[in-house]
Amino acid sequence: MRQAGRYLPEYRAVKERYGFFEMCRNPEAVTEVTLQPVRRFDLDAAILFSDIMVPLAAMGVEIDFAPGPVIARPVRTAADVARLRVPEAEEIAPFVAAAIPMVRAATHVPLIGFAGAPLTLAAYLVESGGTAEGFPGFRSWLHQQPGTAHALLDKLTEVTIRYLRTQITAGVHAVQLFDSWAGVHSAAVHARFGQPYAARALAGIGDLSVPRIYFATNAHHLLDQLADLPAEVIGVDWRAPLSAVRPALPGRTLQGNLDPAVLTAAPEVIAEQAREVLRHGIGGPHIFNLGHGIRPDVPPDRVSRLVDAVRSFDREPAAIPGGLR
Ligand SMILES: Cc1c2[nH]c(c1CCC(=O)O)Cc1[nH]c(c(CCC(=O)O)c1C)Cc1[nH]c(c(CCC(=O)O)c1C)Cc1[nH]c(c(C)c1CCC(=O)O)C2
């Protein structure tokens, strides 16, 4: 999940000097901001500082952040899709490829690279702006222009594969595919427009042998489709306990799933809620994480308390309350 950001004063200090996109395009700034949470907290991994929208600029898309992504000319027609470039791998984000070895040289914790999943990227490209109502314009568009939608998703999938391959070649230890808005779609729509493209993107890096993490929110109705994805790890949002999700995802490591909203509560509450997540994760391999990105109103010391609570958790069978296994 996002672990850098506005809740950290050191992030706000860097952001005063650059615009958000400028930060993303500057290898020194990317390196600095990637390392900030790792310096402050006892974390097991760093996530590359960038944004899922960054590679789309090389396709010819004009993007702004306010703070969420805003597209100057939304992609709507077949001609709009035809105009999108499919850049060569090294043209997509050379500043990211440059930052990765710099981060590697500065920390011993593993580095996670990432990209947006095709359906989530398409939601921003078609609708631009807001997410509050679940991208209703995009959902209509998928039914109005299914052929154009497939053409767009096809291009986004190819760029995603090239971009992830570049990150892996540059040295990331694992990659996460963010399908943050997959859950706004019906299971049937996701089966047509979401799952096949996410599966292709993940399969397209399968030969490179780094762990692949797939993350969606609000995806309980999609679990059977997630079970067919070529990903070693499935990220789970906070809505259902891991023990309830686990049976639908056999053989997978689960990542998650503390509600980020908990991080504004009292430290004892945070610790208890973290232990609850950890207890529900005991039935199989589990990577503790938040269920979504950290919010700007979180006091940084609360994150320290969370890390302490996770580090001191005893994952012995005796810690399992009756029946949870
Ligand atoms: C949907 C999505 C986006 N971007 C991303 C996703 C998938 C993950 C998720 O679901 O949260 C991915 C992302 N975006 C960002 C990271 C950085 C990772 C890190 O270094 O911790 C990651 C992994 C930086 C960012 N990307 C953005 C910020 C905030 C920009 C600012 O500094 O004002 C950061 C730190 C902007 C952004 N970019 C996006 C949104 C919705 C926003 C607004 C977020 C907000 O209001 O805090 C699109």
Image: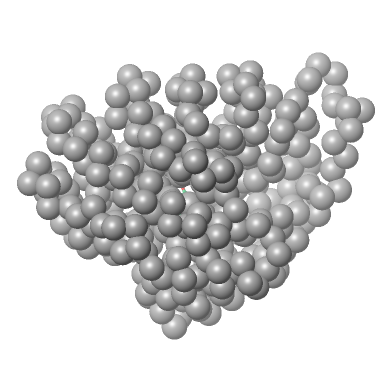
Front in this rendered view, residue 141 or 66: 141
Residue at the image point whose x is 58% and y is 19% from the top: 248
Q: Where on the picture, by quarter, is residue 103?
A: bottom right
**Image quarter hosting the C terminus:** top right
The residue positioned farthest toward the front in the image shown: 207
In the rendered structure, the answer to whether residue 300 lies left or right of residue 51 reads right
How far across and down, in percent of the image, does residue 12 sit?
Answer: 52, 74
Q: Is residue 58 above or below residue 22?
A: above
Ligand 1 placement by image quarter:
bottom left
Look at the image and name its color scheme.
Answer: one colour
Residue at the image point whose x is 48% and y is 29% from the top: 229
Q: Is residue 155 above or below residue 249?
A: below
The residue positioned farthest toward the left in the image shown: 79
How far across and down, in percent of the image, does residue 270 sit?
Answer: 73, 48
How far across and down, in percent of the image, does residue 216 sit?
Answer: 47, 37
Q: Is residue 148 visible?
A: yes
How far across and down, in percent of the image, does residue 303 sit?
Answer: 70, 58
Residue at the image point whose x is 56% and y is 43% from the top: 209
The residue positioned farthest toward the bottom in the image shown: 17
In the rendered structure, the answer to whether residue 269 lies left or right of residue 122 reads right
Count of all numbered marks drawn on residues in the image? 0
Q: Is residue 52 visible?
A: no
Q: Where on the picture, by quarter, is residue 19?
A: bottom left
Q: Is residue 159 above or below residue 317?
A: below
Residue at the image point whose x is 63% and y is 39% from the top: 255
Front in this rendered view, residue 131 or 115: 115
Front in this rendered view, residue 235 or 151: 151
Q: Is residue 28 above or below residue 319?
A: below
In the rendered structure, the answer to whether residue 312 lies left or right of residue 27 reads right
